[in-house]
Image (tube, rainbow, N blue to C red):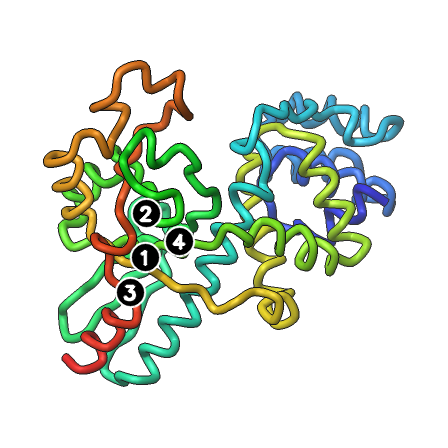
Amino acid sequence: MKAESIARVLPDCRWIGACLGRAQVALRHGRDADEVARELYESSPLTLTRSRETVEKLHTVDFTTLLEPRKKTGSAENPVTKLFPAAVTERQFLDELDRLREARRSIDYKDERFSGHTLVDFTIFENGLELPINVKNAGTRFENAAQLVGLEPNDCIPIPAYKAHDAVEKEHNLLYAVSVDYTLIRKIESHLLTQFNRDEAEVWRLLNEYSGTLIRDAEDKFIYSMVNKHWSDFSEHVALPVFRVISARKAIRILQKLPKRTPGIGLRAWGTGTSAEVNVHICVSSETKSWDEIHARVRSN
């Protein structure tokens, strides 16, 4: 069942677990072992010799016994709290881009999320002009914001400082579009995950239990495909997002003028107060604009 679920849900995934699952299914269907080994070699990081040895094992053991268990080290290792909200938020922003394109027929956009470009998710373009956008979800309230950065928790969003610096150098006009939704994780757990069919639920369990080479490829393929497949039903349970916009250049100006907003730089013993990631903390009400305002400006000119 596990191998068949992997083969149906992740048919072209490069994760070693998916490659082994598909190889086991091929053997069960009577495929030649050497042929299966060569396919495993071509689709996975294994050498040809190692692929042949592995295929021999797959005759007698379940493919999951050859995988390394997943290490649970907090939210960074949990696709619910990290990857699903990002995929949902990006899907919500796609709807915003479609509405903008409908309002101004001369513009279009490129989806760059899977192009290897780490700074830009979408680029709006018209007559040689381009506007790159990075979409973010602020799904966890910074409860110590007042004490540590001087902002109220509900009026504070983080922008990673190193990413903003990189953007200023490489994407001068980059905008961050941030959706602030502290209920999104709960909605994903109570609505989206419950819509999985038997195969999808099995693959979700395997992704949470096992790791291995190129596991992120499996996570991305699974999570984005599930969001797209179940979007029609799931979107009914999610309120329309309120995207707030700030440029990377403005985020860096805030870092320079108000170092306390970036405690990794301006606060002693930062590591004892919160996570070690260095973020510029932005005041939502006074330092960002609504996406509706950006939409109106692009639509009119």
Q: Cα distance, mark 1 to mark 2?
A: 17 Å
Q: Mark 3 = which residue?
A: 290
Q: On the picture, is 266 further left or further right than 136? A: left
Dot 2: element: loop
Q: Split into 4 quadrants, where in the image is the N terminus? A: top right
Taking depth in this image into account, of 105 and 275 the one nearest to the observer is 275
Q: Residues within 10 Å of mark 4 (few under 14, many from 20)?
A: some
- Tell me which amino acid carries mark 4: Arg
Which residue is at a point 25% across and 21% down the rendered structure image? 267
Q: Is residue 93 above or below residue 80?
A: below
Dot 4: element: loop
> Residue 219 location in percent, x, y?
58, 43
- Tell me which amino acid carries mark 2: His
| Front position among marks 1 and 4 | 1
Q: Cα distance, mark 2 to mark 4?
A: 7 Å
Give the mark count.
Answer: 4
Q: Cα distance, mark 1 to mark 4?
A: 14 Å
> Residue 63 location in percent, x, y?
78, 31
Q: Residues within 10 Å of mark 2 (few under 14, many from 20)?
A: few
Within the image, what quadrant is residue 296 found in?
Answer: bottom left
- Tell me which amino acid carries mark 3: Ser
Q: On the picture, is 180 further left or further right than 9? A: left
| Mark earlier in primary sequence (2, 3) | 2
Q: Cα distance, mark 2 to mark 3?
A: 25 Å
Contact flag, marks 3 and 4 (Cβ < 8 Å)? no
